[in-house]
Image: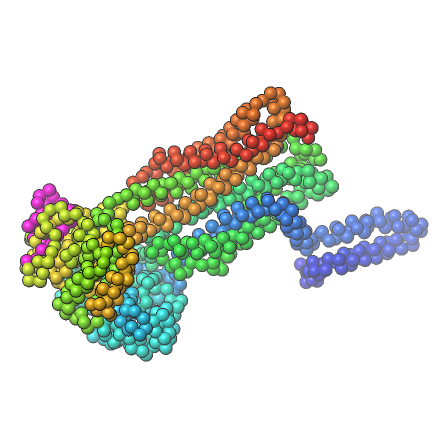
Amino acid sequence: MSLRRITRAIAALLRPRRADAEVTDEVTHYLEEATAANLARGMTKDEARRAALLEVGQPTTVREEVRSSGWEHLVETTLRDIRYGFRRLVRSPLFTATAVLTLAIGIGASTAVFSAIHPILLEPLPFPEAHRLVTVDDRNSEGIPMPATLGTYDEVKARSRSFAALAAADLWRPSLTETETGDPEQLMGQRVTAGYFGLFGAVPLFGRGFIPEDDRPGGPRVVILSYALAQRRFSGPASVGRTVELDSDPYLVIGVMPPSFENVIAPSVEIWAPLQERTTAVVGGREWGHHYAVVGRLAATSSIESASQEILAIGQNPFPEFARPPWASLSQGLLIRPLQESITQSAKPALLAIVAAVSLLLVIASVNVANLLLARGAQRRDEFAMRMALGASRRRVLRQLLTESVVLVLVGGGLGLLVARLGVQALIAVSPPGLPRVSAIYLSLPVFGFAAGLSALIGVLVGLMPALAAGRAAATDGLHRGSNRSVGGRARTRSTLVVAEVALALMLLVSAGLLLRSLGRLTSVAPGFDPDQVITMQVVQAGRAFDSPESQLLFYEQALQAVRGVSGVVEAGFTSQLPLSGDIDGFGYEHQERSGARPGADGAALRYAVSPGYFAAMRIPLVAGRLLDQTDRDGAPLAVVINRSFAERLVGKRNPLGQRLRFGPQMGSERWMEVVGVVGDVKHYTLAVDAPAAFYTATAQWDWVDNVATLVVRSSASATALVPALKTAIWSVNPNVPIQRIQTMDGFIAASSGNRRFTLLAIEVLAVTALLLSAVGLYGVISGSVSERVREIGVRTALGASPGDVVGQVVRHALTLTLTGVGIGVLGGYLASRMIKTMLFGVTALDPVTYGGVILLMVGVALLASWAPARRAVGIDPLIALRSE
């Protein structure tokens, strides 16, 4: 296409009247020249003019042909169709409002969910060559992933050639006691190897990063702050070079990370220090615990498969210089997974279930709008017939209707962006604590592109069927009213769409019902303690005042005494870890009856270091023997209480009292602990998981005193109302101890099923919306059916049909459509329930109560949707109906 032609086409679009005038002038000039030529041949003036018109054509006709020959004509007619489409929408406010709102709900919900799916599951992590980043985990005897030990990290880093870089990180919870910048606070931090930030391609925004000299035993006390912490507690970027006091030790701030840095391994971390730990010849220290996160960047020539094979070969060929305890033997190799898969694994099932649910809702919304357009097309069939009779082609009518549909959907998509914004805020508000990359959920440019593309696609899809139906009707009906065959064809199409709506809505309702039943079963599970009126708070011992075990124990005793003096406190006690809170502290053990076995070969159990009063505060029942009390102190015979599961593992049905055990750091020594009591099982991880083996030891009789403990208080009234008084009581003993994670036990129980609640809430909202849309669609079809059958109903009434007969016919039609959809939806519901199978608890995918309740609900909705059309059918006057025909 020449530049001159393009320029003329653009000019014609911008100045259509001028373009018409120019074409008219050209045609007129050509007619004049043709007339003059004919006159020169000897024709009369009239003959010359007539011959020229026959050769050239009428100026108006020629002008239209010339204007319609270029691409600008397509643009011009499309713009004209868009303007006409907007006028049609304005003239039909009820139709427009219904369709636009329906589309806004479907497109908005889909866009909101995509805004969460995109950064979590689809978008690469915000690091250079993120596909090469992997996590490296150890595995227990059952193949379940668990964090590696520092010894494993050291050996893999030294011997493996599959990694371009490898880094280790350990959680660190330093306490900030600078009261001039706020209340005492325990910070969430990490101790990391020197190459940790470099592995992610991240550098501090201010200051410098860690260097190898920082990461050596006895190295300098230096820290790097997150941008948020620097702004919240210090002087922002000016924090670099400042000395801060953490756990009563001075640390030099050497850097501040940029706000864009996403620490995906531990998103809540706000401060970093060098790890400064290395394994030694002595096996059994903290460096050999399974609590180190290891992250690697694969070499350019390596893959996950080749790296796994190399690690397996390393595990089968030990080197003497690298010690390997039994619990970190590398005998099974290591589990190497993409970093993105590791951090999204727990949230992926819930997110995929929500994606499936919102997809069903979007289809229902689209079907509903298609039904509305079909009904509107039936009302405009005379208009289409007239246009085709006046010369418009079927293709031209089809294009105009598609343009109107796209305009309608784009308006709905624009409103859908507002719905999406509210949806994103709601998703973030109700998201479970473990949902990764929550900060990256927002209406980004890819999300806007998704919304625009989705709107355009739906506009074409929902408009195609009504447009084709209208074109066919106009071509066959001419200027006459639609025949019974054409009316019946449209009715069948709309009925089919409603059946699809009912089936899809039932699928969503079944999924929501199964999740609701599962959550009900889950919350009825006994946790092993009584959560009513129990408040907990984590207390952190920080500073030089707690340098000795004696000072630590004294603080716990005095704080407990002060708390018990608070009015309203019934019982109180400290524990090193709390059930259902996410705390995990376990140790391997030896049973004296099997003392010849390899240390730790008997298995592992969770450790609770508790003070007297903890069992009473939680109301954990005593099964046999006695509970720990004030006599279980340092220097007294070592006593341990175990739970029922641990007892059955140790001795089966025999009496476990008097059995002797060694745990963790005690193994290999002469420090045997005697079982003095057995208590009931307590759910520790979630209510859905069986209670693990657990042992309870007196705080004073463990190898060290935990500097972080949770206070558990049972109150006689509102537990949360006691919080200020409890904090005051603890600070009366030491005003510099941070108090955090204040939560009721009911709150922990609710949070432990966070993924299920999140999925249930999202699918419930989508299912209810789908039910309402299906009811609207069903109402529209039944109402349209009554309108199209006015003459038939009038004749039946004139021939003696009773109102009950008329109502019965209308209701039967509605129930027929509904039950057909239900039949299809039951099969679809079973298939859909397989997607949420991992989130079901205590119910099967074919739970009869759920299916029965959902079917009854759909039938009830069908009866309500048919009530108004049935009343209208009864009120039809036979004479008026027949006269109108």
* Residue drawn at x 48%, y 54% as measured from the top left: 420
Region of the chain picked out in magenta, as a range: 637-666
Give percent across and percent down for residue 259.
39, 68
* Residue drawn at x 27%, y 55% as measured from the top left: 719
Give percent across and percent down for residue 347.
35, 52
Query: On the image, which quarter does residue 711 sit in?
Result: bottom left
- In the image, is residue 177 above or below residue 800? below
Query: Where's the C terminus, which quadrant?
Result: top right
* Residue drawn at x 39%, y 58% as measured from the top left: 438
* Along the line of sight, the residue nearer the viewer: 844 or 19: 844
- Is 746 magenta? The answer is no
Residue sticking out furthest to the top: 800
Give percent across and percent down for residue 878.
64, 26
Residue sticking out furthest to the bottom: 241
Q: Is residue 214 left or right of residue 280?
A: right
Q: How many numbered markers are drawn?
A: 0
- Is 638 magenta? The answer is yes
* Along the line of sight, the residue nearer the viewer: 387 or 786: 786
Can residue 137 be seen here? The reply is no
Figure colour scheme: rainbow
Can residue 855 be seen here? The reply is yes
Q: Is residue 165 left or right of residue 778?
A: left
Query: Where's the N terminus, which quadrant?
Result: bottom right
Give percent across and percent down for residue 523.
29, 45
- In the image, is residue 496 above or below residue 721? above
* Residue drawn at x 38%, y 46% as measured from the top left: 760
Residue sticking out furthest to the front: 567
